[in-house]
Image (tube, rainbow, N blue to C red):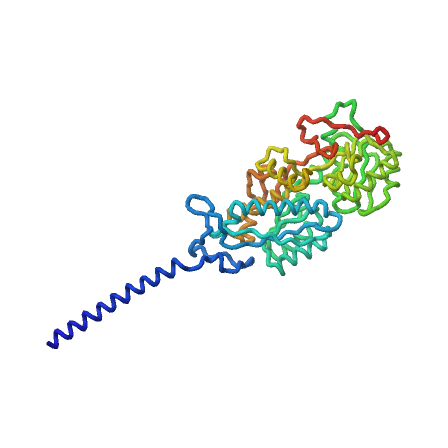
Amino acid sequence: MKNKKMLWLVLIALAALFLTGMLSACGDEGTETTAAPTETTAAPATTAAPTETTAAPATGTTGATGEWDGTFDGEYVIGAIDSLTGGGAMGGAEQLWAQEKAVADQNAKGGLLVDGKNLEIKLKVVDDKSEATEAAAAMEKLIKVEGCELVLSTQVTPINLAAASIAEKYQKFYMMNTSFINWVADQNYKWSACVFNTPDDQAEVPFQIMELQPESERATKWGVLTEDNQDGQAIGGGMKAMAEKHGQQIIEFQTFTPGAKDFSSALLKLKSAGVDALLGFCSPADGITFVKQMRDMDFSPKFMFGWKGFWPQEFMEGLGAASNYILHDGFWSEDLPNPGAKELGQAYRAAHNDLDSVSIGEPYAAAQVMFEAINRAGSVDPAAVRDQVFNGSFPGTVMGDLQFNEKGVASVPHMGLQWMDGKRIIIWPDMGNTLEWFKPWTER
């Protein structure tokens, strides 16, 4: 009897253990299937270290089919410095639009793929007020206050170099555009890259355009009016070098302080010298003032080409019909045969009453490069992203195929376009369009 009682007690204990194990297993399964998704509860941290690759994939991760399921696992903040106020605000507005458009387009494709997670891109913008010292302060704020480790750029070479010096100090990656790549290369940056060209590349365009014209009709007496600053000196030096290269002579060279209100003295010298091919480099506001005073003084060179301030829509709108026949530099056009160029141009015009842009291609492409570099690295670590860009190839951007060298710079062709009745006509590169010589003011 005693043995039977002991046997029953052992059997009961074993049954209890078995039942406990079954209940425990059911409880674990229920916790796994009902847990809230991490992307809806975790607060995104813009500077946090990337999630370990051993973590379980989150809901928004690209699946085995390579398709994004439409949900994000978090967000990542990228900084941007732009000229929202000051002399460069007209171009800065176009640049910011391009950066925001690039972010929206990338987010529509799944954002950034980092450690198997899809992160929504957020853009944090700081105004450089069109000043180099303010650009440095803007970069300092983005890095130290906002925690940004990857930053998209402002425009104009000296302003960008000032910002890049701070990025180098803190070893954060800065993706620049619209800055002379030879100047950038000379700095031997380790954390900053750039898409653009050289002052000589830009300065050669009007001479190339002139050589497309019948020899008997070409202008031969070249004059220059340029800002007396670092950028102006660079493009001015390029003008002199390219004039010599093409067998031309600059017979009058005038400089001025940006923001000048009276150009009468410079105009008188240019007119008196018999200049028939005028080259200008200035801000949009200064360009508008200068052209109006040209009209008042009845100065009508046969050919006029301007950089920097002559391409923004505000230049054409500020002058109206007086902008006709003036040529300007350009960084991009929706008419170029580059992937996505036509769609980008159409989107800009739809948002700007059918006005177009020749500047948005470069900042958009710079953002494309940064996003692709992040995805290739699978990381937002600045060094990992930098290493993808330096010596990297990026085919199929809206600027075409980009090849960066060991200095982190990529060169793109420069363009020459002519304002006519509020529209731009591509004159260089040669696409078969006809140059219209500058019509005298008295004949308009």
Residue 226 spot, x, y in % from top left: 79, 41
Whether 104 is drawn above or below 39: the answer is: above
- The residue that appears at 51% across and 55% down in the rendered structure is 74
- The residue that appears at 28% across and 67% down in the rendered structure is 20
> Which picture quadrant has residue 54?
bottom left
Residue 326 spot, x, y in % from top left: 77, 34
Q: Nearer the viewer, residue 195 or 299?
A: 299
Count of marks placed on residues:
0
In the displayed structure image, the side of residue 237 where residue 179 appears, left or right: left
Quarter the C terminus occupies: top right
Residue furthest to the left? 1
Whether 398 is drawn above or below 144: the answer is: above
> Which picture quadrant has residue 295?
top right
- Quick check: can you spot residue 303? yes
- The residue that appears at 71% across and 40% down in the rendered structure is 199
Residue 98 spot, x, y in % from top left: 63, 44
Q: Nearer the viewer, residue 437 or 29?
A: 29
- Quick check: can you spot residue 237? no
Q: Nearer the viewer, residue 107 or 437?
A: 107
In the displayed structure image, the side of residue 337 where residue 155 appears, left or right: right
Quarter the N terminus occupies: bottom left
Residue 360 spot, x, y in % from top left: 65, 42
